[in-house]
Amino acid sequence: MNAAKRDVRNKQGMTFVSGRSMTTGARYAWWLAIVSMAFLPLSFAVGCGDDSGGGNNQGKDASVDASGTHDSGHNDDAQVQQDGGGADGSVQDAGMHEWNPDDFAHVYEVGPGHEYADPNEVPWESLPTDSLVLIYWRSAPYRSKWVINTEGTQDAPVVVLGVPDSGRLPKISGQDATTRQELDYWNENRSVIKVGGSSLPDENRVPSYVYIQGLDISGARPPYSFTGHSGSVATYSENAAAVHVEIGDHITIEGCEIHDAGNGIFTGWTGSHIVIRANHIFDNGIEDSQYAHNNYTESLGILFEYNHFGPLRSGCRGTNLKDRSAGTVIRYNWIESGNRQLDLVESDHAELRQDPSYRTTFVYGNILVEPDEADNSQILHYGGDGGDTSIYRKGTLHFYNNTVISMRSGNTTLLALSTNDEHCDVRNNVVMATAGSGLLAIVDAKGTVELRRNWLQAGWVDTHNGTLEGTVQDLDNLTGTDPLFVDAANSDYRPASGSPCIDAAGPLADAAVQYPVTEEYVLHQNGKTRSDDGSLDIGAFGAQ
């Protein structure tokens, strides 16, 4: 792809400011420790994925049951202490945080009958550390937009928390929204909620330990307009996002509905330790454009888990989850449709490329669904797209225990690897092409692929392109016409009794042992502990 055609990204020339004192090696080791910790059972009740979820806690009580049970006062989100289920495998929702207002020095309550009628009344420009902003549901959307530029800490974070009503999340709409006049920040046309990049209280500040949770955020794309802090009316840019993290460290977005924007979530390269958890991200994009996506991220250390990525807006040709980060972990998500489901490509920024985690990516426990009408027959792209192959990822993509379902009537290609220097270790996956024999290919043409203990559609081929430029090694895989799901017609892709996938998985790669498959996704935005009889099953689900 011509460099001039690349996606519009964060090009403000921001420097890698304070808060980055660790060496890249130390940051990498820390991030590995964060995402591979022992899991602790947690739950949440935002009401965004389970009929039993949600609540109507209309008051500053001891536990605002709107966010989850990360109930240790001010614990660090990046400790990733979640498994989404109890020890008995019961569904307990994917571990989000529960916040106790009594643990915060500053509490702002927004909504009908509360001190602040609208989010624009909250003093965002001087919001102190150790703040909880509670936004209560009301029938009409809040048409407000703002920036968060506060340096929180692990023990004194900044939390913006929606309080639902019977599962209905408070709506924050950028359409015809107004920015609080006391604010002063750039790129107002890029977001509804922004993190970092503000003149107040200090343009060199790195916001940290910020949580955006339990909100329905939408309305950041043309032709929608807003009134900025100066009073002028402006239109959103095509690369606007519902949530834009321009600068920040330890930023968590969880339990939100994110839709009707150019990009649903956008993070810039000066963001680090990002967690995107248990959100419903859908219906984003720009018509006839490949450059706006449900998710577009480029940060140092990023974790996606328990999210439901739905189709983009009609006529939009972007990717579902596009990422240019170092230290990317994508696990236990449902990702449906898009130009591709996953597009994992290069960073323009040496600060990310020089980090050891840039060349190793982990994708496991996900369900990737390809509808027949999807724009591109490739499921996953890994490497780069800008033309300068010297900065492509050129590492190893660990792709294991995923369930891939293609409903295309024609050809499906699992992987597009940009060069022969890109390597993919493919293990323990179910890859099914419902159209039948001969229509599944492993690669587009290039790259090195090792296939181990996967269930693959019978008649699969190396490539549909005629000439294989790379290599595909078939190392003890299963083939068949039906993996025997419990109820594929109703999207229940668990292995049924008698499935060849049961107890048939092999060991993980040495590098992947630190990321064991201990959980599984539950429709939708939920999770539970994966059943374990001592033998791992092939695919994203364990036999029940």
Image (cartoon, helix red, strand yellow):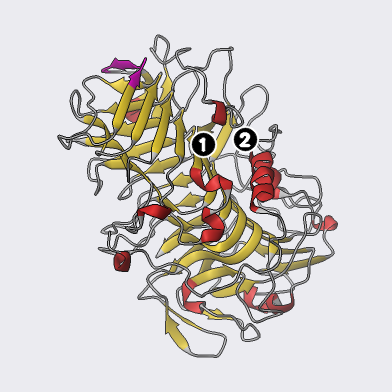
- Extreme residue toward the bottom, this view: 231
Residue topped by disc 1:
332
Q: Amino acid at mark 2?
A: Gly
Between 26 and 399, the one nearer to me in the picture: 26
- Confirm whether the magenta stretch covers residue 478: yes
Q: Quadrant of residue 445?
A: top left
Q: Residue at x 80, y 59 (%)?
A: 156
Q: Residue 161: x, y in percent?
A: 66, 59
Q: Find residue 84 and name its label.
A: 2
What span is in magenta? 474-481
Mark 2 near mark 1, Cβ–Cβ under 8 Å? yes
Measured as percent of width and height from the top left, residue 266 is found at 49, 61
Q: Is residue 403 magenta?
A: no
Residue 201 badge: none
Between 176 and 358, the one lying in front of the other is 358
Q: Label 1's element?
A: loop
